[in-house]
């Protein structure tokens, strides 16, 4: 076919152009622009931008609130992603067993993933309510979950785990079902038990997919914004303030576009580093 | 014994996924006086007044319409531009295939917070603040990497001979795409469109930043900023939450298989 096509003369550029234009204007240009903003002294209510050099980043390194937000973000990401992967894997292995009603069950499991994060956060906010919340009622407790500096971040983590675990479970379920059944039958004939089936078939074959799911979830958790914004707004006493929330407040509440953009660039750099680390791991596991 | 265990486990998973939603449903039907009393766990009588209040007291209908226009518009643009790009990459053998795909994928990793400040200035500069167009364009771009990626994986599975035959028969590339390739890519387009629609329907950060009034506000923003004069109107929030979840719920029920296909096409073949 390629001989015939070469003679006709293909012009793929015309078909790539619309997508390239939109991505260029709405995604790539803003990234260059935010880098420029991050080295400016620029407040929306002040004077025109003035070059700041590394001033904003020097301020960032000395900013205790930045380090607090970074710590909160890392803690939130590590704990929620770890729980999501463990629970998601358990769900996937369970749902891979034969049972009647797989299709409706798949719809049920999709639901938490598909509903807006803002809505999920509102639902949990109501359940966490200190006075009339169903969680306190069922637990016989009297805790102000979202107002307590220790509990607030864990409440946010629990909500995130509820919402994201089904996504993990569905992807791992698809991966698990793509493993040929013959492998398990043959191993069972050889007398392998459930643990050895998991250890020597499921785990090694699922691992590459697991890494990809980890990339998706880590990046998503690291940029968490919606859930925290609705649940706590970063409080109490900044104990749930993540990087995205802090950057948003600096940008749109104090209108410091220079420093806020430097914070946004910091999020960007962290995510680039996480992605690079995972790609490196993925390469290693493919070998 | 093992079977019973499986069904018990499946029931527990279902309860895990549904319990918060079920509680929201109960809340939305609870008479106002019973919102602040537990027990009883279940309301003594059901009421629809929270649902009525959502539409009567707030511009909720307008926000629903905004959400539909924005998510629908973004989906159409992402599908049109995404399928053209995927077509060029897979069937027209665009040079630098791997590099282009890598760049597209890399842009999907960009955190929204990193582009929100420059986009805000750009949108303000163009006079597009508080318009639906600003959100449609932003979401289309936000969703394009996903669309290109999933559609590329779908189009790869169509034999190249189809395209070659159409070209030899005298089709221009555009005719070949519209008449031959796209009709065969229906499942891929459906899966991609559903994913993009759900992502756009749920988006919050850009919507919060680029909108100012009900003219362009979408439902997630409306729910996050739900006004309460003296106390938080939990019944109304619950009713509004369920209304905005309903379209997603219907899509999930009807197309669960396609959505999961799209999700796995996005991940597994990576």
Image (tube, coloured by chain):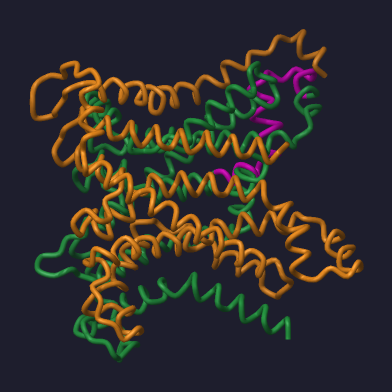
Q: Which colour denotes chain B?
A: green
Check the image and report above or below for B199 versus B182: below
Magenta stretch: give its range: B166-192
Which picture quadrant has residue A223? top left
Q: Is residue B62 visible?
A: no
What percent of the width, then of the height, locates residue A198? 73, 63
- Front residue (pair A238, B188): A238
- Front residue (pair A89, B190): A89
Check the image and report above or below for B154 versus B202: above
Counting labels gives 0
Residue B176 among those drawn in magenta: yes
Residue A43 among those drawn in magenta: no
- Front residue (pair B140, B6): B6
Position of A102 with respect to A234 (left or right) is right
What percent of the width, then of the height, locates residue A101? 66, 73
What percent of the width, then of the height, locates residue B32? 21, 80
Check the image and report above or below for A34 versus A142: above
- Considering the image in quadrants, where does the C terminus of chain B appear? top right
Q: Which colour denotes chain A?
A: orange
Residue sitting at x 70%, y 9% = A9
Position of A233 with respect to B18 (left or right) is left
Which picture quadrant has residue B158? top right
Position of B207 with respect to A22 (left or right) is left
- Considering the image in quadrants, where does the N terminus of chain B appear? bottom right
Q: Is residue B13 visible?
A: yes
What percent of the width, then of the height, locates residue A6? 76, 10
Residue sitting at x 34%, y 65% = A155
Question: Predominant secondary structure in magenta?
Answer: helix
Residue sitting at x 9%, y 21% = A47
Residue sitting at x 16%, y 23% = A41
Which picture quadrant has residue B27? bottom left
């Amino acid at each position: 076919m390629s001989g015939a096509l070469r003679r006709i003369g293909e012009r793929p550029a015309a078909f790539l152009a619309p997508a390239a234009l939109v991505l260029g204007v709405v995604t790539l240009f803003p990234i260059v622009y935010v880098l420029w903003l991050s080295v400016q002294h620029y407040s929306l209510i002040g004077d025109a931008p003035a070059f700041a050099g590394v001033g904003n980043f020097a301020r960032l390194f000395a900013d205790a609130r930045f380090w607090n937000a970074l710590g909160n973000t890392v803690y939130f990401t590590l704990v929620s992603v770890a729980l999501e992967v463990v629970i998601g894997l358990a769900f996937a292995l369970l749902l891979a067993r034969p049972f009647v009603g797989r299709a409706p069950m798949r719809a049920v499991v999709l639901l938490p993933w598909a509903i807006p994060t803002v809505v999920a956060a509102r639902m949990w906010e109501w359940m966490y309510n200190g006075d009339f919340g169903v969680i306190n009622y069922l637990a016989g407790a009297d805790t102000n979950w979202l107002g307590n500096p220790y509990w607030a971040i864990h409440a946010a983590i629990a909500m995130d785990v509820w919402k994201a675990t089904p996504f993990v479970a569905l992807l791992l379920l698809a991966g698990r079902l793509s493993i040929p059944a013959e492998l398990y039958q043959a191993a069972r004939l050889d007398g392998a038990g459930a643990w050895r089936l998991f250890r020597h078939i499921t785990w090694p074959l699922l691992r590459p997919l697991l890494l990809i799911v980890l990339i998706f979830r880590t990046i998503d958790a690291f940029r968490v914004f919606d859930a925290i914004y609705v649940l706590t707004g970063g409080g109490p006493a900044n104990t749930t303030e993540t990087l995205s929330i802090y950057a948003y407040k600096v940008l749109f509440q104090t209108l410091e576009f220079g420093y806020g953009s430097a914070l946004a660039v910091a999020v960007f750099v962290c995510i680039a580093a996480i992605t690079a680390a995972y790609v490196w791991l993925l390469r290693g596991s493919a070998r | 014994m093992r079977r019973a265990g499986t069904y018990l486990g499946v029931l527990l998973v279902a309860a895990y996924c549904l319990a918060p939603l079920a509680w929201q449903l109960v809340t939305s039907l609870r008479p106002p006086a019973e919102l602040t009393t537990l027990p009883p766990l279940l309301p003594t009588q059901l009421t629809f007044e929270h649902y009525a209040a959502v539409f009567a007291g707030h511009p909720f209908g307008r926000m629903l319409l905004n959400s539909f226009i924005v998510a629908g518009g973004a989906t159409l643009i992402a599908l049109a531009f995404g399928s053209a790009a995927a077509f060029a990459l897979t069937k027209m053998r665009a040079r630098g295939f791997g590099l282009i795909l890598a760049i597209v994928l890399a842009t999907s990793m960009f955190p929204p917070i990193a582009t929100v400040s420059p986009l805000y200035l750009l949108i303000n500069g163009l006079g597009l603040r508080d318009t639906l167009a600003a959100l449609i364009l932003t979401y289309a771009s936000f969703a394009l990497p996903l669309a290109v990626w999933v559609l590329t994986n779908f189009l790869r599975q169509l034999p190249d001979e189809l395209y070659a035959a159409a070209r030899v028969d005298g089709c221009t590339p555009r005719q070949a795409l519209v008449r031959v390739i796209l009709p065969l890519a229906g499942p891929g387009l459906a899966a991609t469109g559903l994913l993009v629609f759900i992502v756009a329907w749920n988006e919050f950060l850009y919507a919060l930043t680029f909108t100012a009034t009900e003219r362009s506000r979408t439902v997630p923003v409306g729910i996050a900023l739900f006004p309460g004069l003296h106390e938080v109107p939990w019944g109304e929030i619950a009713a509004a939450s369920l209304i905005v979840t309903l379209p997603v719920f219907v899509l999930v029920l009807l197309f669960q298989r396609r959505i999961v296909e799209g999700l796995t096409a996005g991940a597994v073949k990576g």
